[in-house]
Amino acid sequence: MDKKERLVGTVSRGIRCPIIREGDDLAAIVTDSVIAAAESDGFELRDKDVVAITESIVARAQGNYASVQDIADDVKAKFGGDTVGVIFPILSRNRFAICLRGIAMGAKKIVLMLSYPSDEVGNELVSLDKLDEAGIDPYTDVLTLEKYRELFGVNAHPFTGVDYVAYYGDLIRECGAEAEIIFANRPQAILQYTDKVLNCDIHTRVRTKRLLKAAGAKIVYGMDEILNAPVNGSGCNEKYGLLGSNKSTEDKVKLFPRNAQPLVEEIAARLQQKTGKHIEVMVYGDGAFKDPQGKIWELADPVVSPFHTEGLKGTPNELKLKYLADNDFSNLSGEALKEAISESIRKKDSDLVGKMASEGTTPRQLTDLIGSLCDLTSGSGDKGTPVVLVQGYFDNYTN
């Protein structure tokens, strides 16, 4: 074996940084932290490494915050302050509950329509088995709160222990609004209660708006259209509004970062200048993966990566090694097999879409794959590594 042959493939490292505050020079902090980590741990930065920055510290450095009162004022201005149908929210204290406080403060009554058996990202209100036992069809049946309780009782979240039905109802009333809760999956069902609708779904929002408007809704806004411009001097997000926001304090949300393309370009330029290496840079939020036990799909952000450098566009273009080994070169082994596969990789087409030798490779965007890796690496707790360095991701068997 060649002593210089690399035996390690992709490596993902969490990079510790100072606590980021509003106004910090994030480009300098990220660049310096990555270089300091390399020097401290004795590894080298290489061309096509990826530096990924969690969206949270980007928004914090930008000071992109808003208060629940800002949300209330925007909702009241757009809906008139009367009855608002709030449909398809996710079940989350961190993601939606604080937004609901502001929404309720801006209306006299909230008709809250929850999707069932689970929310958009997989948080369960009732099991499919229980629906089957009760003879309920979630595609057509609209349940009142009373009917839901009669059939299914209390269903606490398996991880948090929260009964979100009661929690959201109590929260609305605490904010001074009347609350009515129903359960349905067809957007048009809300129009039996009100023609002013705020749809809170994330990835299906365009279709939901289209269906509501076609069915005669008078006023329709999505969460992406609340705080899509400053209110009372607040932060905002022109493209995503409240989508991607997180609870900051009991009275304030941190919004999804805005206008951060110049940031990723600047960090890439600084790293190039200081290391001589071409390093890709991205901002990432929730990874796009699903928990097989809780059935929760992680992606509560509108996208995994809102900003990234040019080299992270597209999808992987890879051959399936086991396909080559089991089919094209089934008669080879050892060094002969290794060389044959290496030669296939060196000569592979620039676009392998539809080719059998690429069957079984992951057909997803690079930013979704790398962002999911980074989200799992950084975690959401106290690791203190809001920057992730990924090395070797673009390597293959020949490198």
Image: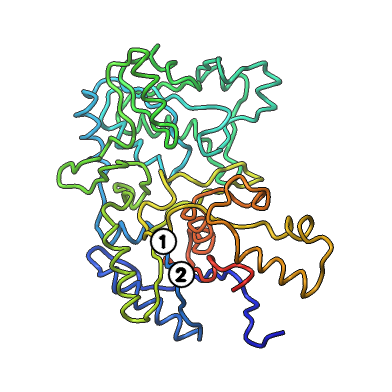
Task: Determine whether label 1 and label 2 are within 8 Å by CB.
Answer: yes
Question: In front: 191, or 112?
Answer: 191
Residue most extreme to the right: 331
Callout 1, which amino acid? Gly
Name the element at disc 1.
helix
Q: Residue drawn 49% across and 30% down?
A: 165
Callout 2, which amino acid? Lys
Residue 98 x %, y %: 36, 42
Residue 319 x %, y %: 64, 57
Q: Which mark is residue 311?
A: 1
Question: In front: 387, or 348?
Answer: 348
The residue to which callout 2 is attached is: 48
Name the element at disc 2.
loop
Residue 265 x %, y %: 30, 64
Q: Residue drawn 60% across and 57% down?
A: 318
Residue 388 x %, y %: 46, 67
In the image: residue 97, left or right of residue 331 = left
Q: Decide: is 19 above or below 276.
A: above
Measured in 3D between alpha carbons, the distance from the residue under mark 1 to the one under mark 2, in whole angstroms, is 8 Å
Q: Residue drawn 82% across and 69% down?
A: 333
Residue most extreme to the left: 232
Give the colour scheme of this rendering: rainbow
Q: Which mark is residue 127?
A: none
Q: Quadrant of the C terminus?
A: bottom right
Indicate the quadrant where residue 117 lies.
Answer: top right
